[in-house]
């Protein structure tokens, strides 16, 4: 009988942020187990979930042996990531929110990502998922591309500011030393965008996986829906919506450029 190949990432800690979606967390952890992927440690940072989810977290902790970091009440995404990252001791952090599921291509791509981080100290972060491809890329080997940010208004796709993303990514665990902590007390979207500005302002270098659906799938169910609500302007076909969106993205481009110029950690 053929022996199953296992993958142990000793220098990586898996950081999962969680809020009221214990079934989703179980699905994530079970998927990694099914891929025979293990880590130097797992940290689950909970943002003040309801009591029934906290009880399930305790059950999952006994099965998957993770470090559970709890909060007495909901303090938002920034606080949840900060307190989880504070528990990380290994050189690298794989950050994943609980509603993602690793796919069959995870190990092959993750091994290459780790090789890059080990050999190229200029790389701060490698992104593994996105709703849309980063707009300005240059080649970086067969599996990844480097995200290239430009202040130029001729680079007019406002998604260029999202060099950082809260979607699954690998980063160096000393991330805060270069880019500072996440801002707390803000909405999730604002917290994420503030880190985007910090990443750019502080000279961050990030890579983007070419096949950005190969490693993770985002799964939300009716019983555990997404806690983030976003519009679907980019995919709607209505002509008026298209015109309004065109005006809006130009406004966003100018606004975000000004925010970046004025940004201070």
Image: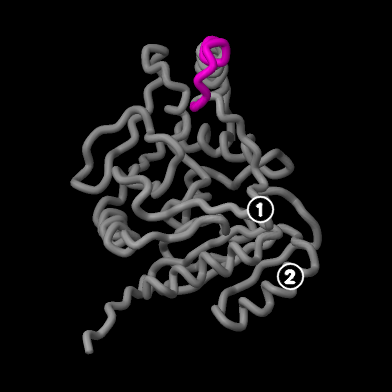
Seen in the picture, residue 163 relative to 249 is either above or below; the reply is below
Q: Which residue is mark 1?
A: 222
Task: Using the image, tell me which numbered label, if any, was put on residue 54.
Answer: 2
Quadrant of the snapshot with the N terminus: bottom left
Viewer-proximal residue among 61 and 257 = 61
Residue 148 percent coordinates (x, y): 33, 30
Label the magenta part by its dominant secondary structure: helix
Write down the region rendered in magenta: 235-243
Instruction: Tell me where residue 232 sits by quadrant.
Output: top right
Cα gap from disc 2 to disc 1, whole angstroms: 20 Å
Q: How is the image coloured?
A: one colour
Residue at image position (37%, 23%) is 150
Looking at marks 2 and 1 on the same chain, the residue that comes earlier in the sequence is marked by 2
Residue 30 shows in this picture: yes
Residue 171 shows in this picture: no
Residue at image position (34%, 52%) is 214
Residue 76 percent coordinates (x, y): 71, 48
Viewer-proximal residue among 237 and 169 = 237
Mark 1 falls on what kind of element?
loop
Quadrant of the snapshot with the C terminus: top right
> Is 236 covered by the magenta stretch?
yes
């Amino acid at each position: 009988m053929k022996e199953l190949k296992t993958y142990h990432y000793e220098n990586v800690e898996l950081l999962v942020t969680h809020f009221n979606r214990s079934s989703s967390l179980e699905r994530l952890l079970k998927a990694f187990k099914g891929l025979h992927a293990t880590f130097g440690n797992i940290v689950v940072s909970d943002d003040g979930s309801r009591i029934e989810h906290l009880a399930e977290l305790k059950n999952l902790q006994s099965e998957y042996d993770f470090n559970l970091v709890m909060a007495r009440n909901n303090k938002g995404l920034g606080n949840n990531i900060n307190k989880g990252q504070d528990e990380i001791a290994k050189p690298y952090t794989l950050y994943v929110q609980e509603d993602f599921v690793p796919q069959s291509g995870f190990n092959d791509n993750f091994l290459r990502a780790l090789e890059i981080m080990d050999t190229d100290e200029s790389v701060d972060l490698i992104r593994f998922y996105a709703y849309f491809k980063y707009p300005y890329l240059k080649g970086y080997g067969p599996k990844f591309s480097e995200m290239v940010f430009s202040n130029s208004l001729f680079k007019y796709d406002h998604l260029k500011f999202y060099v950082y993303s809260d979607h699954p990514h690998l980063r160096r665990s000393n991330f805060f030393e270069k880019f500072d902590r996440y801002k707390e007390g803000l909405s999730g979207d604002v917290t994420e965008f503030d880190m985007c500005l910090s990443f750019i302002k502080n000279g961050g270098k990030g890579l983007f996986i070419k096949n950005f659906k190969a490693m993770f799938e985002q799964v939300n169910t009716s019983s555990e829906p997404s806690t983030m609500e976003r519009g679907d302007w980019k995919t709607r076909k209505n002509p008026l919506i298209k015109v309004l969106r065109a005006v809006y993205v130009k406004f966003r481009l100018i606004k975000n450029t000004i925010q970046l110029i004025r940004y201070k950690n």
